[in-house]
Image: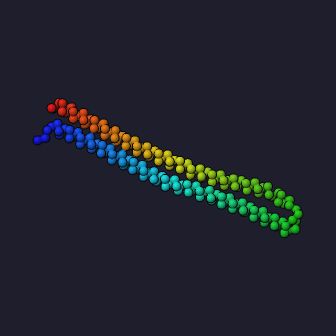
Amino acid sequence: MCDPISLLIASVAVSSVGGFVSAAGQSAMAQSEADWRNYQLEIQNRQLAEDQELTRIQALETENKRLDQNRRLRAANEAFLAGSGVGESRSFLQGVEPQGERALRQDVASLRLQSATQINRIADQIAVNKAEGQFARARADLTSSYAYTNAAFNAASSITRGAYLYKTRG
């Protein structure tokens, strides 16, 4: 038969090692989950950055189309006046051009504001994703720390309980 002290020591050792093995598993799982979440967020942030660039390009294209339409309309009006025989009288264009220019400036400003708003929303989402990634990493670190702390306290408790049993029965 085995010596009771040897059995007690073996029990304490197995219990303590088991606690630390469990803590290592919890830590690895938490770190793995954080790594996976950060990977997902990195992919999403790259897609969002591409969306930002696409928004900028689309806004510039739309703005250029509007400016081009305005130039063509102005050229058509000037051609019409020149062809009508009243080419020397520009009073029609003088009355219409300031209002058209003002409408064009407002239209372009509105387009720029819309694209800037959309780009800023995307930038905000990227910032939120980065903060979420930091939170996932911090949560994993805390989970790991708590698991090892719990294992250490359980080991200390097991050792203390073993010592008590040895003193009272031995």
In this picture the colour scheme is rainbow
Residue 10: percent from the left, percent from the top?
20, 41
Q: Which residue is pictured at 75% across the width and 64% down the height?
A: 72
Q: Which residue is pictured at 33% across the width and 47% down the height?
A: 25
Question: In the figure, is residue 59 to the left or right of 46?
Answer: right
Which quarter of the rendered picture does the C terminus lie within? top left
Q: Which residue is pictured at 71% across the width and 53% down the height?
A: 106
Question: In the figure, is residue 4 to the left or right of 148?
Answer: left
Looking at the picture, does residue 1 appear above or below residue 165?
Answer: below
* Residue nearest the viewer, comparing 52 with 35: 35
Residue 163: percent from the left, percent from the top?
21, 33
Q: Which residue is pictured at 84% across the width and 60% down the height?
A: 92
Residue 57: percent from the left, percent from the top?
62, 58
Picture quadrant where residue 157 is located: top left
Q: Residue furthest bottom?
A: 83
Looking at the picture, does residue 91 appear above or below residue 33?
Answer: below
Question: In the figure, is residue 93 to the left or right of 140?
Answer: right
* Residue nearest the viewer, comparing 121 with 12: 12
